[in-house]
Amino acid sequence: MSLDRSDVEKIAHLARLQIDEADIPEYTQNLSNILDLVDQMQAVDTSSVEPMDHPTDAVQRLRIDEVSEENQRDKLQSVSPAVDLGLFQVPKVIE
């Protein structure tokens, strides 16, 4: 698929990008090359390829679920400007 100057200008406008006039031909060529590559990839026959849910079939290693730090809530809340019933109080940001 080949793009022309007006296509690149429309794309830049929609994406809210400001492109220098001197750079438009280079953008046009680069975007056309990308779209040509996508067309080539779309043309590949993948009907005999089995879909993969993960490219390496890796399994996530899980760590033991154990406490690694002590509870520091009282220490952290001691420097807080406002605490109520063990909860940090913050200024209202939505009216």
Image (cartoon, grey):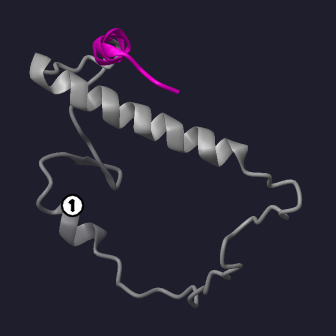
Residue 69 to residue 17: above or below: below
By secondary structure, the bulk of the magenta-drawn segment is best described as: helix
In the picture as drawn, the residue positioned furthest to the right comes out as: 48
Where does the image place residue 30, in percent across and percent down from the top left? 33, 36
The three-letter code of the residue at mark 1 reads: Gln
Image position of 90 with respect to 21: above or below: below
In the rendered image of this protein, does residue 72 appear above or below residue 68?
Answer: above
For this rendering, which residue is in front, 23 or 73?
23
Q: Which residues are magenta?
A: 1-13
Residue at the image position 26 percent from the left and 16 percent from the top: 16
Instruction: Identify which residue is drawn at 41% across, 88% down.
Output: 68
Q: Is residue 78 left or right of residue 84?
A: left
Local packing at callout 1 (Cα closer than 10 Å; few below 14, some 14-19, many 20+) is some
The residue positioned 33% from the left and 18% from the top of the image is 8
Q: Quadrant of the C terminus?
A: top left
Q: Position of residue 64 (x, y in %)?
A: 58, 90
Q: Pointer 1: what residue?
A: 77
Image position, residue 83 (x, y; %): 24, 49
- Residue drawn at x 12%, y 16% is 21
